[in-house]
Image: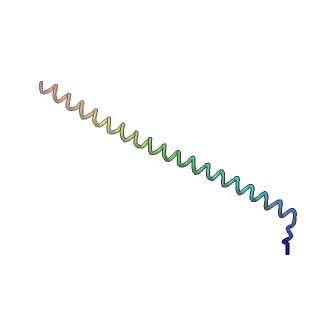
């Protein structure tokens, strides 16, 4: 017993399947882009932490230099 499908319904089903595939592909691209953005944010956060650490070290060194000069 074969299932009879209205030709218009079959066309609609194929169109929906194609649209679903396109949406799924776009969601995958969005997810990949978001992953890259988040990885980039981690890099920026690490760089920011290193810059702040550098600022603290430079500030400490300057304070030590000023103290040393004052002692002379």
50 vs 67, left or right, is right
25 vs 69, left or right, is right
- Res 24 → quadrant: bottom right
Identify which residue is drawn at 70% across, 52% down: 22
Identify which residue is drawn at 36% across, 39% down: 50
Please provide percent x and percent y for residue 46. 40, 42
Of all residues shown, which one is farthest toward the front?
1
Identify which residue is drawn at 27% across, 33% down: 59
Q: Quadrant of the C terminus?
A: top left
Identify which residue is drawn at 61% across, 52% down: 28
16 vs 6, left or right, is left
Residues 66 and 44: in front is 44
29 vs 13, left or right, is left
The type of colouring in the image is rainbow
- Res 66 → quadrant: top left
Decide: is 38 above or below 61: below
Q: Quadrant of the N terminus?
A: bottom right
Residues 19 and 61: in front is 19
Please provide percent x and percent y for residue 31. 58, 51
């Amino acid at each position: 017993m074969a299932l009879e499908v209205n030709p218009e319904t079959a066309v609609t089903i194929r169109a929906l399947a194609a649209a679903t595939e396109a949406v799924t592909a776009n969601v995958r691209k969005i997810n990949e882009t978001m992953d890259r953005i988040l990885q980039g944010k981690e890099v920026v956060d690490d760089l920011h932490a290193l810059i702040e650490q550098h600022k603290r070290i430079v500030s400490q060194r300057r304070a030590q230099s000023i103290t040393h000069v004052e002692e002379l």
